[in-house]
Image (cartoon, helix red, strand yellow):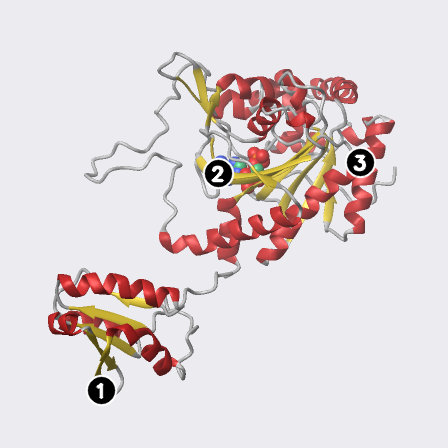
Amino acid sequence: MPFKKKPVAPKKVVVPEKEATPLTTAAPVTDESEGGNSKNPELLRGFRDIMPEEQGKWNLVRDAVRRLADAYSFDRIDLPILERADLFLRTLGKGTDVVEKEMYVFTDPSNRSVALRPEATASAARAYINHGMLDRPQPVKLWYMGPMFRHDRPQAGRYRQFYQVGFESFGVDEPIVDAQLIVIGMQIFKDLGLDVKVQINSIGTSECRKAYLAELVAYFRQHRAKLSEDDKRRLQKNPLRILDSKEEATKELLEGAPQILDWLDEKSKEHFMKVLEFVEEMEIPYQLNPYLVRGLDYYSHTVFEFVLADDTGDSSQAALGGGGRYDGLVEILGGRPTPACGFALGLERIVKALEAKGINPPERRQPVVFFAQLGDAARRVGLKLFEEFRQSGIPVAEAFGKNALKAQLEAANKLGVPITLILGQKEVLDGTIIVRDMESGAQEIVDVKKAVSIVQRKLVPVALDKPAQI
Ligand code: AMP
């Protein structure tokens, strides 16, 4: 087999699993730390606010994704956050953590079982069927961005509401589709200045997986005594997930376990080799990871994950994103058999990686003019004037909420603007405005209609695009 790269070792961290929560009952609240004595309103555990000061980095990511989606002709789709629970139960697979333990499922006022989406690929496939996209020229290439919900154990890099962007390509089974999706993901990271590698594996078709799983189960049955209760359960319910096990004993056993790549049929092998060839052709750093299976049942053939290049594989929260081929998904949902492939990236983890690397967005332009007003008539003129300056590309600051001139001049001083405009009752009546040079303190009264052009002239020596200190 021409799979040249050395497989990576399975991940080392032991992450204790929670008890399974039956789907039909509300999740237990016993593991929650909320409900203390604090008088402040409390946020749900695992949920967070994305604060104004973080938005710059988030925008860097959102903008890079939008740019690349456009460049690769992916069309944006917005999908509902709430879906029928059944959509996920049918597609993600019984015995998967997401379905068994992590879904926010509840009954809506119409007595329907609904779920907050734990991921959006199933929704994208549903939309593909609902809108007859099978009859459009294929591939249909969609991208989305939005919050996902999983009632998992919150920890660093793992939230109960988190944001994903996803790219999905429906209708073409060529390996180049898988490879191009990997290229797009890598390009997003490159644009952001992050050094990322891709881990890749093939889990073949459900037929070749069946034969492999029989072998895998037989192997682990021989070593059953060494398995944790969780892994015993996995072995019974969803044996492929045992490859993903975080238990040390299981990881040791995995070294001697049969590997899925050896069980691929000729077509699956050929598909995978072509994907790898394209990926190599694009000089994408990749590692074969025979233990990579991804959490969900709908995957087939290629599966991959994006991890930071310097990542040692020690953390279960290391992946910045992942995806794969899901040729059976549309059919499971009642559509025509439709090959498809896609990936999703976790925005919180990407933003965290930007933070760790000290990558910051360009700073906002600093105001160069401050508008000070005295009274409501002046405020009215000020509102209009603010728009005129904004349209001329001159960033203006104001303190419409302050009344005293002294306080407003102090604010102007703090911002370090070279010019302050002062508008009092008298100036409003006269149709004038005072232009104050903040360095010399010199003031002149000018026609308010000429304020923009006069300030523009005065500002020539001052760089208008001086970055802000925010
Ligand atoms: P998945 O398809 O579950 O592998 O999710 C794709 C990506 O979404 C992961 O690689 C993470 O970056 C991100 N992600 C998944 N679950 C969470 C979570 N609970 N909190 C934060 N990010 C997550």
Evaluate whether residue 93 shows in this view.
Answer: no
**As drawn, 106 above or below 314:** above
Give x and y (percent) for residue 424: 14, 71
Q: Quadrant of residue 380?
A: bottom left
Q: Earlier in the sequence, mark 1 or mark 2?
A: 2
Q: What is the crowding at mark 1: few (fewer than 14 residues within 10 Å), some, or many (at least 20)?
A: few
> Mark 3 or mark 1: which is in front?
1
Element at label 2: strand
- What's the residue at 37%, 82% (across, down)? 457
The disc placed on residue 293 is none
Q: Quadrant of the N terminus?
A: top right
- What's the residue at 13%, 71% (across, down)? 429
Q: What is the crowding at mark 2: few (fewer than 14 residues within 10 Å), some, or many (at least 20)?
A: some
Q: Are marks 1 and 2 in contact (CB under 8 Å)?
A: no
Q: Are marks 3 and 1 in contact (CB under 8 Å)?
A: no
Q: CA distance from mark 3 to mark 1?
A: 74 Å
The residue carrying mark 1 is: 442
The residue carrying mark 3 is: 272
Amino acid under label 1? Answer: Ala
Give x and y (percent) for residue 462: 39, 81
